[in-house]
């Protein structure tokens, strides 16, 4: 079984400032990691994912995340946010090997302040 | 229509009503999912269908009854719901029923049980 922790429920940040949204996970086996974004009144859409290989993963809209196995973290970063990045961000994890269901975190609401 | 669509987008029902939520995916995927999204809680996986066969039922009360008549359509039949069932119900699909597959979400049905 695996779990995901997103400690920050809300993160306010000024426009054009950098942001980091934190995600920590626990699992007894190797994992796949995902970040999804949910804009108001919409479903979730994939921002980026880590399956294997380079630990720095680049996604859509200028976001990137780094997989840190020793710290069991997969933090999401963007060097300069825009108003349009205001949304809720979900970290998710699944165990590798065969079929394993995806476990989502509780989400972090990013509020970009003009 | 493209992606994953859900109807209705909003639903208000009494505790004695019977209603159904509909999901349709236009992506040619083999797996479909129902999730429940409540405030300040992680997404709760309710049901998983793979190639039209139900493969997972996460201890969901029997007042929720899924149906998958073909690989493109998924229904969630509702009857004698409770107020605590009020939530956003999200449908998703993926190419395969594996943990590494990206899930594509619909916009959700906002359900209010009076």
Image: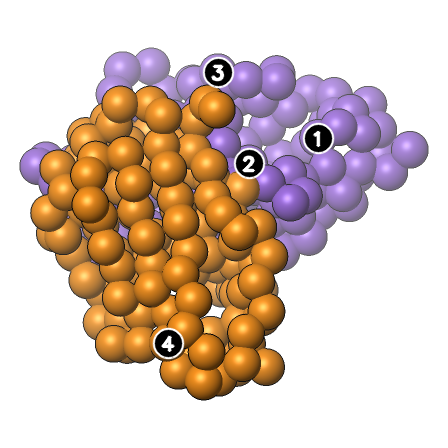
**Which of the chains bears the disc numbered 1?**
A
Lateral position of residue A109 relative to residue A53, left or right:
right
**Residue matched to label 3:** A58
Q: Please give the label number shown on residue A85.
A: 1
Q: Are marks 4 and 3 in contact (CB under 8 Å)?
A: no
Q: Secondary structure at mark 4?
A: strand
Q: Give the residue displayed 82% in from the left and 23% down from the top.
A: A16
Chain displayed in orange: B
Q: Nearer the viewer, mark 4 or mark 3?
A: 4
Q: Are marks 2 and 3 in contact (CB under 8 Å)?
A: no
CA gap, disc 4 and disc 2:
31 Å
Q: Earlier in the sequence, mark 1 or mark 3?
A: 3
Q: Earlier in the sequence, mark 2 or mark 3?
A: 2
Q: Nearer the viewer, mark 2 or mark 3?
A: 2
Q: Residues within 10 Å of mark 2 (few under 14, many from 20)?
A: many
**Residue matched to label 4:** B79
Q: Give the residue displayed 39% in from the left and 82% down from the top.
A: B80
Q: Residue A111 in the image: x percent, y percent?
A: 76, 43
Q: Secondary structure at mark 2?
A: strand
Q: Secondary structure at mark 1?
A: helix
Q: Quadrant of the C terminus of chain A?
A: top right
* Residue furthest to the right: A114
Q: Please give the label number shown on residue A37.
A: 2
Q: Residue A20 in the image: x percent, y percent?
A: 62, 35
Q: How is the image coloured?
A: by chain
User: Do discs 2 and 3 share a chain?
Assistant: yes
CA gap, disc 1 and disc 3:
16 Å
Lateral position of residue B104 relative to residue A110, left or right:
left
């Amino acid at each position: 079984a695996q779990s995901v922790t997103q400690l920050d429920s809300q993160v306010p940040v000024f426009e054009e400032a950098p942001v980091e949204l934190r995600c920590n996970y626990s699992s007894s086996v190797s994992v796949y990691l995902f970040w999804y974004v949910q804009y108001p009144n919409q479903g979730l859409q994939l921002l980026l994912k880590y399956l294997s290989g380079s630990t720095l993963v680049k996604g859509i809209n200028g976001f990137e995340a780094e997989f840190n196995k020793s710290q069991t973290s997969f933090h999401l970063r963007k060097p300069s946010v825009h108003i349009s990045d205001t949304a809720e961000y979900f970290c998710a994890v699944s165990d590798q090997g065969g079929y394993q269901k995806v476990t989502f975190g509780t989400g972090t609401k990013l509020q970009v302040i003009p | 229509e493209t992606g994953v669509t859900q109807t209705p987008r909003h639903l208000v029902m009494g505790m004695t009503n019977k209603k159904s939520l509909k999901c349709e995916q236009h992506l040619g995927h083999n797996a479909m999912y129902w999730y429940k999204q409540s405030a300040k809680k992680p997404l709760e996986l309710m049901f998983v269908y793979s190639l039209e066969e139900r493969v997972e039922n996460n201890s969901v009360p029997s007042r929720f009854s899924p149906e998958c008549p073909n690989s493109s359509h998924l229904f969630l039949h509702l009857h004698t719901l409770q107020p605590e069932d009020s939530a956003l119900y999200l449908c998703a699909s993926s190419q395969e029923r594996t943990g590494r597959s990206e899930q594509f979400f619909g916009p959700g049905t906002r359900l209010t049980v009076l």
